[in-house]
Image (cartoon, rainbow, N blue to C red):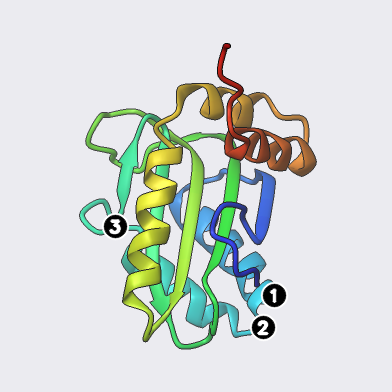
Amino acid sequence: MQQYLDQPDLILPSLRATGRKQILKDLAKEIARKIGTREQIVYNRLQGNAAPEQCTMSSGVMIIDMAMGAVSLPFTALARLSGPQDFTAPDGQPVDLVVTLISPDRDKIINLQNLASWSRRMRDEDLLAALRRAEDSEDMFLALAAQNRPQKQAA
């Protein structure tokens, strides 16, 4: 797990989209493998935190924010679904990008900073377009990295 909040620890460029439950199961499997904990623990947390009233959804993006004792540093996963799915978003748009933020139980400030940062990033229409047209995880990583670079100002 990285200490930098601006890049995900796990990028899944084509998570199989066959319904809400399967998406969360597949996401839990990949996250559990990466953080070294049981899949069922991650799935149960995702299930509770991916409810429409518990997560942030807008413009086809769902941000799931949760705390877990299984992590000692913040962990971020970015998944692009193989097709848009209805998660009952307030704006009515189906979800095709899922950001999962996992923070240590004890670290509320880092959790809020991470959530604020990713919420801002996922409102950038150019970034969302780049993530959606990316060929693979490397392209998704590069799109995120390009957004982090300071823009040159005209002289």
Q: Earlier in the sequence, mark 1 or mark 3?
A: 1
Q: Identify the residue position indicated by label 1 in the image.
A: 33
Residue 152 placement, left or right of 93: right
Q: Identify the residue position indicated by label 2 in the image.
A: 36
- Quarter of the image that includes the C terminus: top right
Three-letter residue code for mark 3: Ala
Which residue in the rendered view is the most extreme toward the top? 155
- Frontmost of labels 3 and 2 is 2
Q: Residue at x 20, y 54 (%)?
A: 53
Instruction: Say what secondary structure mark 1 lies in.
Output: helix
**Rendered view: 22 above or below 41:** above
Three-letter residue code for mark 2: Gly
Comparing 88 with 122, the one in front is 122
Crowding at dot 2, Cα within 10 Å, few <14 / some 14-19 / many 20+, comes out as few
Res. 52 mark? none
Q: Give x and y (percent) for residue 118.
A: 44, 48
Task: Tell me the distance, in whole angstroms, between the alpha carbons under discs 3 and 2.
Answer: 24 Å
Q: Residue at x 58, y 26 (%)?
A: 151
Q: Are marks 1 and 2 in contact (CB under 8 Å)?
A: yes
Quarter-of-image position of residue 59: top left
Crowding at dot 3, Cα within 10 Å, few <14 / some 14-19 / many 20+, comes out as some
Q: Identify the residue position indicated by label 3 in the image.
A: 51
Q: Residue at x 29, y 57 (%)?
A: 51
Instruction: Say what secondary structure mark 3 lies in.
Output: loop
